[in-house]
Amino acid sequence: VAAAGGANQAIGHRCHSLACAFGTASFAPRVNAALNPKSYTVECKMIATDFLMHKYRDLFDFAERAIEKGPSFLAGKNANSPEKQVTLFHFVRAMYLLEGIHVLCTHGLATEAMVLLRSLLNLYINIKWLTATDVAQRFERFADFEVIFRKLAIQRVIDHGDIWDQIKDEDLSVHDQNFESIKKKYSLAKREDLFNWSGKSIFEMASEQGVDLEKDYRIIYSRLSSIEHTGPESVRDYLDDSDTGSTKIKAGPRDENIDLVLLTALEYYFNVKAIAHNAFDLEWPNLENDKEAFLTLQRKYWVGNDKEGLTSG
């Protein structure tokens, strides 16, 4: 994609950093050490946000400018087809996810921003898969599944919401006819089929030719699952037992993973933005300038950088 041309030069650095950011320290041996409260103390470790603003000023400013430009290139355009509407939805959501990631990173909460980064990668896989081949059919299926998901949501409220008295007089069958029609249209015979709008897993979508995001899925999406779901691999992102007899809590702002998370988010966002430009048949003014500015930051923070702050575990 035009916006991130050359980004693959640094993907190895990014993936290596993420791979090293998880699983490099064993949690289990230190659990027993914590059982003796007389020899174990807890400390808090944080860093001032003004230090982060100074250190990452160029990166934060670049991201802020990208967010401010937002969807301005679409002013006056009409999303008059399913492809344009669904693409616009993905682009706008990507913009909001990038803004959330930027806010968290500027406050030293890049590790927490990894949850949003995982969502942004999921979104990028979606839109690349939608636009890779059989475009009309794929966008139509995505749009059709809105009815499926709304019907399932209504049914869950009926079954588990404990609010029957409030909704018993409402027309809860409003989606039934379309629901049955779409089930038949896509041969959704099994219940699990109803929860998969693409008919494929995220991995299958990412690995498909024309999408080519298997590496990102395996190293980034899968690794960040531990952060999102509070898995044991993420313990060292919050606790530091490197000093015998004490545990440091990584509380508040931390100078960890900021450039890794924000640059990766910008890369995904620019690729989604490029897809939106293509969908609306619009040129990207100053594309080369934006690309060079991004690659300059990428080279500064990744290429030739040993990433000690990220690979130390």
Image (cartoon, grey):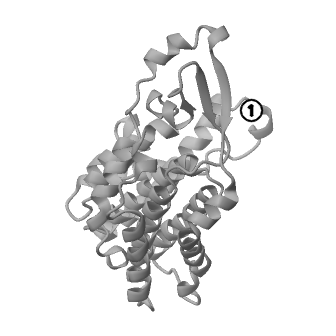
Q: Nearer the viewer, residue 143 or 214?
A: 214
Residue 69 in percent (x, y) is at 58, 81
Q: Nearer the viewer, residue 264 or 2?
A: 264
Say which element carries label 1.
helix
Say whether residue 106 is left or right of residue 141. Answer: right
To which residue does mark 1 refer? 164
Quarter of the figure that contains the N terminus: bottom left
Say whether residue 181 is left or right of residue 166. Answer: left
Tell me if residue 293 comes above or below residue 263 in the rendering.
below
Q: Residue at x 53, y 52 (%)?
A: 116
Task: Report the number of discs.
Answer: 1
Which image quarter: residue 55? bottom right
Residue 303 in percent (x, y) is at 33, 65
Q: Nearer the viewer, residue 167 or 7?
A: 7
Quarter of the figure that contains the C terminus: top left
The answer to whether residue 176 is visible is: no
The answer to whether residue 27 is visible is: yes
Q: Residues within 10 Å of mark 1 (few under 14, many from 20)?
A: few
The residue sitting at the right extreme is 166
Which image quarter: residue 194? top left
The residue sitting at the left extreme is 209
Q: Residue at x 57, y 35 (%)?
A: 238
Q: Amino acid at mark 1?
A: Trp
Q: Nearer the viewer, residue 24 or 45?
A: 45
Residue 58 in percent (x, y) is at 55, 73
Say whether residue 228 is left or right of residue 303. Answer: right
Residue 233 in percent (x, y) is at 43, 31
Q: Residue at x 60, y 22 (%)?
A: 246
